[in-house]
């Protein structure tokens, strides 16, 4: 008995539709071997810093001096490296990288330098400074801070950049108001919040498209250590904080559309160009917080977080995830 051709045609169309809908989400970055190697070097450097390894300076310099290193994409790494150098008394090298950060338009380097210099660590029952207070370190701070302020005052910053910084701050404030309404009140209009979030997300997309020479994702007016764990490490500025809460926690149809029609391809292209593995984090974010609800064990790169910590995977899942991580240059998960 021959199958009905009309029925078979409907089945084939259904299968093709399903394949395309899944494939649209599952399109993964195709990275050149040299880009994978670069991300591997970066991941090793960051883990060495977090674990305070004996060879952290060597590993970090391998990363910062790599031919693919881009200051626009990774200039914020200088400050974290400077803290390592100052803890170890490497003042000459620290000054070199601090003066580099002072020339950046993507951070207020002098403020960040003061912050890391004043950072403390708890050693019960006393609190001590992470960077030892010695006559040499105090003199270094005063001398280099003066040089940094002089550089920052002479920077010729594009007016567009400052306008974008201001507008992103306003968008972040609107997102914060929406978030507080949801979490701190019981009387709110979810439809109005969704409309507001939709405007925020699509304005971000417009800013990115209108200013291809400015890395919107690296505009960082504040620094959060929510994800400062061995794997992954992300520095969340206002743009990322907006995406984190809107794309991750409030998965309305506009968030799905924004991801499918813009952000998936945008983050994939950044990964392929060596501008960072934002893609891996946001891919896992959408995978675990998609339209079908939250599943904290759904992860492709092992970057799904549960209460700020990496999800613990079974041995079989860890093997699968580590194979995916290897393809983009991320170190394997060990737990």
Image (cartoon, rainbow, N blue to C red):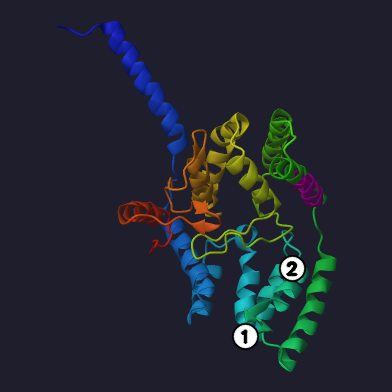
- The residue range painted magenta reads 161-173
Image mark for residue 192: none
Which residue position holds label 2?
Answer: 109
As drawn, which residue projects farthest toward the front? 186
Residue closer to the observer: 248 or 162:
248
The answer to whether residue 223 is magenta is: no
Instruction: Find the distance from the CA under tag 1 to the CA under tag 2.
Output: 19 Å
Left or right relative to 39: residue 128: right
Dot 2: few (<14), some (14–19), or many (≥20) neighbours within 10 Å? Answer: many
Kindly tell me whether residue 331 is visible in this rendering. yes
Which residue position holds label 1?
Answer: 90
Left or right relative to 200: residue 276: left
Residue closer to the observer: 207 or 121:
121
Residue at 49% from the left image edge and 69% from the top image edge: 47
Position in image of residue 173 (x %, y %): 78, 46
As drawn, which residue projects farthest toward the left? 1
Residue closer to the observer: 175 or 49:
175
């Amino acid at each position: 008995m021959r199958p009905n051709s009309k029925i078979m045609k409907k089945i084939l169309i259904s299968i093709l539709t399903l394949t395309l809908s899944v494939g649209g989400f599952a399109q993964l970055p195709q990275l050149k071997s040299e880009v994978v190697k670069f991300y591997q070097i970066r991941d090793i450097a960051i883990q060495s810093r977090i674990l305070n390894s004996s060879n952290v300076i060597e590993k970090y310099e391998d990363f910062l001096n790599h031919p693919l290193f881009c200051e626009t994409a990774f200039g914020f790494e200088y400050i974290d490296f400077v803290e390592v150098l100052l803890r170890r008394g490497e003042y000459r090298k620290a000054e070199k990288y601090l003066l580099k950060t002072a020339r950046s338009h993507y951070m207020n380097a002098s403020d960040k330098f003061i912050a890391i210099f004043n950072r403390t660590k708890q050693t019960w029952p006393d609190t001590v400074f992470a960077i030892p207070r010695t006559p040499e370190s105090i003199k270094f701070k005063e001398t280099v801070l003066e040089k940094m302020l002089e550089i920052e005052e002479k920077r010729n910053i594009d007016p567009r950049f400052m306008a974008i910084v201001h507008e992103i701050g306003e968008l972040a404030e609107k997102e914060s108001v929406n978030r507080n309404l949801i979490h701190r009140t019981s009387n709110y209009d979810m439809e109005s919040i969704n409309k507001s979030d939709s405007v925020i997300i699509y304005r971000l997309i417009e800013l990115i498209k209108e200013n291809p020479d400015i890395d919107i994702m690296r505009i960082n007016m504040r620094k959060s250590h929510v994800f400062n764990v061995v794997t992954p490490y992300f520095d969340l500025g206002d743009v990322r904080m907006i995406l984190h809460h809107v794309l991750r926690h409030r998965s309305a149809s506009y968030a799905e559309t924004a991801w499918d029609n813009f952000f998936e391809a945008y983050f994939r292209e950044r990964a392929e160009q060596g501008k960072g593995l934002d893609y891996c984090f946001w891919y896992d974010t959408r995978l675990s917080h998609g339209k079908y609800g939250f599943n904290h064990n759904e992860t492709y790169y092992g970057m799904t977080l549960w209460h700020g910590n990496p999800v613990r995977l079974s041995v079989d899942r860890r093997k699968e995830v580590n194979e995916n991580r290897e393809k983009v240059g991320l170190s394997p998960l060990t737990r």
